[in-house]
Image (cartoon, helix red, strand yellow):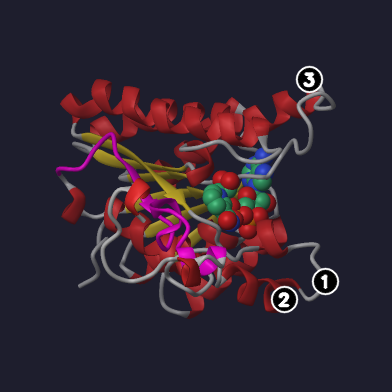
Amino acid sequence: MGKLEGKVAVITGAASGLGRASAVRFAAEGAGVVAADLNSQGGELLVSEIAAAGGRAVYQRTDVTSEQDIKTLIDRAVREYGRLDITYNNAGVIGATGSIETTTEAEWDKTFAILIKAVFFGIKHSVAPMRAAGGGSIISTASIAGLSGSFRLHAYSASKAAVINLTRTAAIELGKDKIRVNCICPGVISTPLVHGGIPGGKETLDPILGKAQPLQRAGQAEDIANMAMFLASDEANWITGAAMVVDGGFTAGTPFQLAGVEQQLSAGYSGPSFQR
Ligand SMILES: NC(=O)c1ccc[n+]([C@@H]2O[C@H](COP(=O)([O-])OP(=O)(O)OC[C@H]3O[C@@H](n4cnc5c(N)ncnc54)[C@H](O)[C@@H]3O)[C@@H](O)[C@H]2O)c1
C-alpha cells in the first residue's frame, strides 16, 4: 500500500522540474493528483505518463497569479476525487534578475505575484476543503535563497523569505484544524529552471553543480519530491510551520577543499595566534 493511498493532491508547476517529479511520486504512492501549470503540453504529457504507470492524475490549466484560477483548481480536486488532502504550492520562475537599480516595478510585481501571492491563494483556498476532510498538508516551495541573500536575485530571495514566514503564520492559525503547513528550501537543483537556456543544458550543468556543496553530486528533482512526499504523508503528522532544507549541505558552509584552501590548513592543534 502506498504512503498516500486514498489522499488527493493538488500540485502547481507540475509540468516540469520539482512539481513534475512530485506528481509522479505522489501518484506512485497512491494519491489522486490534480496537476496544474501554464504549460498545457507538459501537463497533459505528465498525466498520460502517470496513467500509463497505473496512477491517477488530471491536468488543470492554471495561472497561479489568478485567485480565480486557484479557486477553480481546488474545486476541480474536490469535484474529481471528492476531497482535498494535500496542496503543494510549487510553481515558480526566477523572475527579476540583475541590479536593484535597474529592476523595474513591473518585474518586481510579477516575481512576487508568482512566488508569494500565489502561495497565499493556494493556502487560502485549501483551508475549507481540508477542514471538511478533517485535516491536510499544505507544502510550498521556498528556497535556500529565502534563508540568506542571493547575488542579484533581489525579488526572488525576498519573496522566498516571505514564503517561509507565511508558512509559519499559517501553521499557527491552522493547527487547530489539523492542517499542517510546511515549506521546502531546496538548494540548487538540476531542473529546466536552472539549466534551460544553457548550451548543453543538464549535461553541461550537472558536473558543475556537483561541486557546489558537500554532497558532491547535482541535486535532482527527485531529492525534493522525497521531502514533499514525506511532508504530505501521515509520517509527518507532528510537523508544521517548518522550513525543511534539502540542499546537499550547501547551507552547512562551503567545504574548504571546494574553496581551494585545504592545503593551507595543517592537521593537528592550532593554538593562540601570537605563538604560531
Ligand atoms: N531548481 C532549483 O534550483 C530551485 C531551487 C530552489 C527553489 N526552487 C523553486 O522550485 C519551484 C519549482 O521550480 P523548478 O526548478 O521545478 O522549475 P521549472 O521551471 O522546471 O518548473 C516550474 C514550473 O512552474 C510553471 N509556472 C511558472 N509560472 C507559472 C504560473 N504563473 N502559473 C502556473 N505555472 C507556472 C512552469 O511552467 C514550470 O512548469 C519554484 O518555485 C522555484 O523557485 C527551485
- Provide the residue designation for mark 3: 105
Residue lying farthest front? 275
Q: In the rendered image of this protein, does residue 252 appear above or below residue 134?
A: below
Residue 143 visible here: no
Q: In the rendered image of this protein, does residue 103 appear above or below residue 14?
A: above
Type of the residue with mark 3: Glu
Q: Nearer the viewer, mark 3 or mark 2?
A: 2
Q: Say which label, 3 or 2, has the lower sequence index.
A: 3
Type of the residue with mark 2: Thr
Q: For the residues marked 3 and 2, what is the alpha-carbon distance in whole angstroms?
A: 34 Å
- Provide the residue designation for mark 2: 204
Q: Are marks 1 and 2 in contact (CB under 8 Å)?
A: yes
Please say whether residue 258 is one of the residues in the magenta stretch.
Answer: yes
Residue 199: image tag: 1
* Residue at image location 81% in from the left, 23% down from the top: 101
Element under disc 1: loop
103 relative to 254 in the view: left or right: right
